[in-house]
Image (cartoon, grey):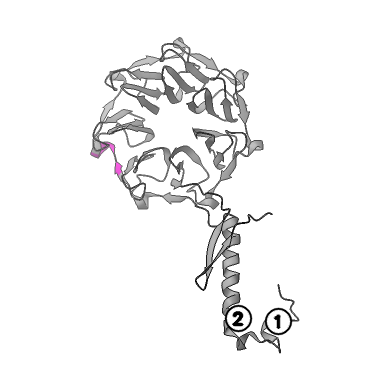
Amino acid sequence: MVPNNHPITQSPNHPITQSPKILNTLIRWSSAVMLFLLVSRGVFAAEYTNKTTANGLGHNTVYGVYASGTTVYAATNEGLSISTDSGNSFTNKTAAANGLGSDLVSGVYASGTTVYAATNEGLSISTDSGNSFTNKTTAAGLGDNWVLGVYASGTTVYAATSSGLSISTDSGNSFTNKTTAAGLGSNWVNGVYASGTTVYAATDGGLSISTDSGTSFTNKTTADGLGDGDDTIYGVYASGTTVYAATAGGLSISTDSGNSFTNKATAAGLGDNWVHGVYASGTTVYAATDGGGLSISTDSGNSFTNKATAAGLGSNWVLGVYASGTTIYAATGGGLSFSAPATPVSAALFSIKDKPVVFSQELKE
């Protein structure tokens, strides 16, 4: 910074106004250095783009999200919104127009051209990429018509209901319902995930795990290291022997197939201890927190960096999260937010009057 008593424009020996070439060079150099500083500090890092009803969403409150290729599915408060252009625009599906059980969609999953929508009036299934739906209710064996979450693998479909975990082995035509009698921690099931013969049910009474395709369950609670507070589990995900449980007291992580858990809270960088949903890919873990934003860990959940509205999220109230490739999708109370995570900059190329200038030294704070 130039001292106030020596302004550049008043230098009697070398007035800038008499040397436009020098001024031009200084501006170019200054601009290049400033750009490098901004990029190195992540100012131009990829921010989140938020989509709302203006882009075709049925409602700005999004409860869940799933993506496959360029197709994105958003479970909203007023319909299932589907995008076929990577989330740029959406077409909304409703009960009246497309056969959904209800316009309130709590969760969504898709496999190929088959789409499953968890509604508060049944599990709606489409076999034509979401153009039309057939709704399944208690008449088909569901524990309750209020379905809070859904997952499918092959011809097996799992529906998390308010009265048990309903399992179908015939592509959702009929269901068998599992309750506390089969070992569930509670009949209220908030979410479900499965891998092979292992089934995980997030219940109001703990995380219930089955190793026999859902025939019987063993229930895990705070006594096994799950998050502080009550035993309510809001979401679950697993990869290999690592199990992630979203609780009201933090994100609980097990590395021994769910036998014991270590809980991560705000002290580890979470935006809030109340976690609505979780997803993981490799060593990267995503936690959807209540009012605290989207918390991301790149070290298997040991520490987190939090993203909030300042990063472009539609709301800090994040209800669900999913990642596909390099794109992260966050279901928020203010829209569907998505972003490709930024790559740290260690080298940048600029040019001054067509002459390249390479900065390769990372800046230190």
Residue appearing at x 53%, y 65% in the figure:
350
Screen quadrant of the N terminus = bottom right
Give the left or right position of residue 294, taking residue 364 as reference. left
Separation (CA) of disc 1 from disc 2: 16 Å
Tell me if residue 147 comes above or below residue 290 in the rendering: above
The question of residue 234 being in magenta is answered with: no
Quadrant in which residue 358 is drawn: bottom right
Foreground pick, 267 / 291: 267
Looking at the picture, which amino acid does disc 1 mark? Pro
Indicate the secondary structure of the residue bearing disc 2: helix
Picture quarter containing residue 229? top right
Closer to us: 60 or 250: 250
Judging by the rendered image, the residue that carries numbered circle 2 is: 22
Q: Is residue 65 rendered to the left or right of residue 26? A: left
Closer to viewer: mark 1 or mark 2: 2
Query: Does residue 291 appear in this view?
Result: no
Give the image quarter of residue 113. top left
Label 1, secondary structure: give it.
Answer: loop
Q: Is residue 18 above or below residue 292?
A: below
Q: Is residue 12 above or below residue 309?
A: below
Q: What residue type is disc 2 on?
A: Ile
Which stretch is magenta?
Answer: 92-97
**Residue on which the image places disc 1:** 7
State which quarter of the image contains the C terminus.
bottom right
Of residue 325 and residue 271, the one placed in the foreground of this image is: 325
